[in-house]
């Protein structure tokens, strides 16, 4: 069965996708598609790169939770939008968890540290990329203006480094997830942004 924390992360990411569907005036099916790929798209891409059957196709929880999130957003999207500051905290927690778990899985299949970090970041942000592409938006990863991919990258790097020093399991996962979560929260609190190229200014 899918771990409870994994399901919680999937639920938050799925809500993000379903709400994007509401904003784009998609129907129920479109909302469900965005919810599913936002929630589990990163994990699917990671597993395809590794060369294993995606976990999303083995456990029914990966399907039922996005469907539940779609139903919640369909009926109560105004209330969820008002609660977005709180939802973003859970989103940051999901980011930390997914980058740690994704990196760990890549390392367990024998990938090198740098490749595992790449797949850890992909696990955390890949669903958001698919969400943006499917909804006709420029992927936010290409202009990381709210320090989303950067915390995932640092969290994944910590996981890979600890693995190299023989620190595995819960301790490594907790350390990398907390780092990514904490950096994301601080970035939201203080409005930290990734730098632009020299001489380039923020648009309008």
Image (cartoon, helix red, strand yellow):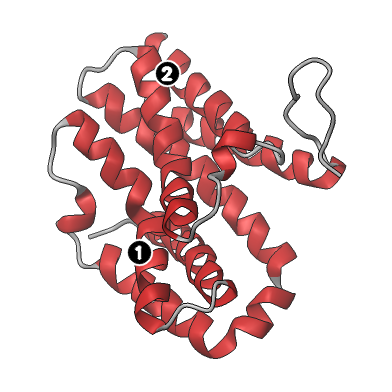
Q: Furthest-top residue in view? A: 165
Q: Is residue 10 left or right of residue 50?
A: right
Q: Furthest-bottom residue in view? A: 75
Q: Is residue 30 left or right of residue 94?
A: left
In the displayed structure, 89 sits above or below 61; it is: above
Callouts 2 and 1 close, C-beta under 8 Å? no
Q: Is residue 65 left or right of residue 1?
A: right
> Alpha-carbon distance for marks 2 and 1?
28 Å
* Residue labelled with disc 2: 160
Whether residue 170 can be seen here:
no
The answer to which quarter of the image holds residue 38 is bottom left
Q: Earlier in the sequence, mark 2 or mark 1?
A: 1
The answer to which quarter of the image holds residue 203 is top right
**Tag 2, which secondary structure?**
helix
**Tag 1, which secondary structure?**
helix
Identify the residue at horizontal 42%, vertical 9% (top origin).
165
* Residue labelled with disc 1: 36
Within 10 Å of disc 1 (Cα), the crowding (few <14, some 14-19, many 20+) is many
Q: How many marks?
A: 2
Identify the residue at horizontal 54%, vertical 67% (top origin).
20
41 or 169: nearer the viewer: 41
Identify the residue at horizontal 86%, vertical 41% (top origin).
190
Residue 148 image offset from top left, x and y in percent: 62, 39
């Amino acid at each position: 069965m899918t771990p409870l924390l994994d399901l919680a992360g999937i639920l938050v990411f799925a809500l993000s996708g379903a709400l994007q569907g509401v904003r784009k005036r998609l129907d129920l099916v479109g909302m469900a598609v965005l919810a599913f790929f936002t929630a589990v798209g990163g994990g699917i891409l990671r597993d395809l790169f590794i060369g294993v059957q995606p976990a999303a196709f083995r456990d029914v929880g990966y399907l039922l939770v996005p469907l539940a999130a779609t139903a919640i957003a369909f009926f109560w999207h105004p209330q969820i939008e008002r609660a977005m500051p709180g939802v973003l905290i859970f989103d940051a927690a999901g980011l930390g968890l997914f980058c740690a778990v994704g990196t760990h899985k890549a390392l367990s299949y024998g990938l090198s540290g740098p490749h595992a970090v790449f797949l850890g970041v992909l696990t955390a942000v890949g669903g958001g990329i698919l969400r943006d592409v499917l909804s006709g938006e420029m992927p936010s990863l290409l202009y990381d203006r709210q320090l989303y991919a950067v915390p995932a990258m640092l969290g994944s790097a910590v996981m890979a480094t600890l693995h190299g020093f023989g620190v595995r399991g819960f301790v490594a996962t907790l350390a990398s997830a907390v780092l990514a979560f904490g950096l994301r929260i601080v970035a939201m609190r203080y409005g930290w942004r990734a730098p632009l190229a020299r001489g380039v200014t923020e648009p309008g």
